[in-house]
Every structure is written in structure tokens, then in C-alpha cells.
Image (cartoon, grey):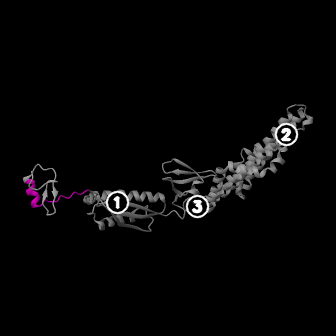
Amino acid sequence: MLLSQWIAIGVAVTVAVLLVFALRWVLKHRLAKVWGAAQHVVARTAFSGYAAAAVLGANLALPSARDVGWSTYQTIQHSMRILMIATLTALGISLAYAVTDMILARLSIANGDADRKARRLQTQVRLLRRVLTSIIVVLAIAAILFTFDQVRALGAGLLASAGIIGIVAGVAAQSTLGNLFAGLQLAFSDALRIGDVVVVEGEWGRVEELSLVNVTIKIWDERRLVVPVANFTTTSFENWTKQGTAITAKVELPLDWEVPIAELREEAGRLITSSDHWDGRSWSCQVVNITETGEVIVRVVATAADTGAQWNIACQIREHLVTWLVANYPESLPRNRTQFLAADEDEVTYAARFPTSAFRRREPNGVSGPSGGDPGEV
């Protein structure tokens, strides 16, 4: 290429980058005060905006193939065209994320558990922007493929075979499509939201991320449990915050029959009503069962505002009542009893006559004797 052509390309790239810089400055310092999405657009397009502008300017300034004598120039043109599609795709995804960031910022609240509607909308917006991103990427890949002459020549045949290709693709991507529709079903049926407290596969945690493929659950001990989205539509799971964050703490104490129920109930009530973790709704202390081993099951329940308070008040009740019982009523603690029965006069007489007999049997008349023999036999 001639020097003038290189200069033209450089000027085009410079002008395009300067225009993007000026537009970002206006968005950041002028429109941000009246348009909420402006600051999110500036933040999201920090790289993609300049990259798309530079590549687009270079493509516009590139000379035609007949003006350049290079044998590889057409390959360069083709590569620049593909690069332009890729950078414009990245810019489109950045703008989509900027708009959704504005919506999510409006939905953000101080206490994520307090507003179920906001968390439901957050889940839907995050999932929809992932779907939109997937669509944009698929369209970009299709546009890149159709820049090749061989693929464009096969376009008519591919269109005619769209039905067969669709069936094959559907079978091959059955798992992915199943997860996609399962994710949409979860988000729009309000069965699961980001921030929900759930119990899945025996693990207690909070939904941290809901994508098109997996649900990431942050377990209480900082581990992450990654579960396929389809599992939440085919198997049951516990959602502790579906209708609200209020929950009831339950503590069961296996105690002895001698436990003073009235005093225990009074002490439990004094503790619960003075606890900062109790939400003031209700509490109770009741004997709910008596086991076959002779234990009395006392259940203490107290309501709490959220799962964190529920855990704390349950531990508080358990620790306090155990300490109180040990200090004041140690006979109330679980214990095993053995009952010794006194022998009757006949058994005492027989034992004196036959001290070496290892086994004795009870006759119908109540007299004990050695198994299989007569009481008079030695």
C-alpha cells in the first residue's frame, strides 16, 4: 500500500477513537446526572468501545483489493472483517450488560432477604441477559461463518435441510436445552431466586448464582455447591425463604422423667423473651414425646426474623438450658435405670439346696427347679 493509504487508515482510526472518547466524556460528565444508564455504559464499554471504534475505522479506510498489489491482501481484508464483527459483538454485549446493570442497581436493597419481589426480578434480569448474550454470540458466529465463500455457497442447502439439522442439533444439545428451559422455568415461576436459603442434597446454603446451566449455592462453611439447573425442576428441595424470611427455631431435649416441666418452661420463656434474636412473634416449651427407653422429649420453639437469627437463638436455647439443668436439676439429665426384683421364698430355698445349679426354670406351680429335671434331683 502507498504511504497515503496508511496515513488514511491511521487518521480514520484516530478519529474513531477520539469520537468514542468524546462520547464517553459526555456520558460520564453530562448525561450521567439525567440518565441513570450513562455511568453503567461508561463502565462496561471501557475496552470494547475503543476496540470496536478502532477496528471499524480501519475497515472503513482500507483500500480495495485492486488498489493493492499484495497477494495476501484479501486474507487481511477478510481477517479485518471478522475482527470487526467480533468487536461489534463485544460492544453489543457490553451495552446489554450496561442496561441490565442499571436495572439491577435500582433493585438492589440493603437487606436482600427483606424484599422477595426485588430478588425475583434480579434473578430474571440476570438470566435474561445471559440468554440475550447467548443469542448475540450465536448470531455473531453465524455472521463470521457467512463471510467465507464456501459456507455462503452452502447456505441454500443448509436452509433446505434446516428441519433435519434442527432435529440433530436438538438431540445433541438436549442436556443444554433442558438446562436452559429449566432455568427460565425456575426464574419466572418464582420457585428459586438469587439470595434464597435452600437445602439441597443435605447441604444448607444460599443461592449465589443462577446461570443457564448451573445453580451455585454458597454453603455456610464457604464451600460452593454447583448443581445442574434441571435438578431443581425434577427433584424436590427446601426453600426456606420462598414466602418470606421469617422462620422458627426448634430445639429438642431428651430428658429424664424427673424434669420439672413448669420450671423448665419458665426458664425457657425468660431466656427467649430477653434474647435479641427473637422476633417477638411466638415461642413454646412442650413435652412432645416419650420414648421407649424412658426419655421425655421436650421441644422448645422460638420464632426468628431470618435464618441467621434462627440459628443463633437455637444455639442459645440449647446452651442455656443444658447449663441451667446441670446446675439446678441434674437429676433431669438423661440416664438409664435398672430395676432389681427381690426373689420369693421358694427361690431362696432352692438356691440354698442346689447352689451349683446354673439354670433354673419356673414350674407352673411357681416352684423353680433345674431346667429339664425335677426339683428333687441333684
At numbered mark 1, what does the secondary structure look like: helix, strand or loop? strand
Tell me whether the residue at label 1 lies in contact with that at label 2, contact meaning CB atoms closer than 8 angstroms: no
The boundaries of the magenta stretch are 336-352
- In the image, what residue occupies the spot 78% across and 51% down? 162
| Foreground pick, 184 / 248 | 184
Residue ID for mark 1: 253
Q: Residues within 10 Å of mark 2 (few under 14, many from 20)?
A: some
Left or right: 244 as drawn, with respect to 359 = right
- Image position of 294 with respect to 172: above or below: below
Give me the disc on residue 11. Answer: 2
Q: Earlier in the sequence, mark 3 or mark 2?
A: 2
At numbered mark 3, what does the secondary structure look like: helix, strand or loop? loop
Magenta span contains residue 226: no
- In the image, what residue occupies the spot 30% across and 68% down? 262
- In the image, what residue occupies the spot 68% across and 54% down? 129
Give me the disc on residue 191. Answer: 3
Quarter of the image for the N terminus: give it: top right
Left or right: 317 as drawn, with respect to 330 = right
Left or right: 139 as drawn, with respect to 370 = right
Q: Position of residue 35 (x, y in %)?
A: 72, 58
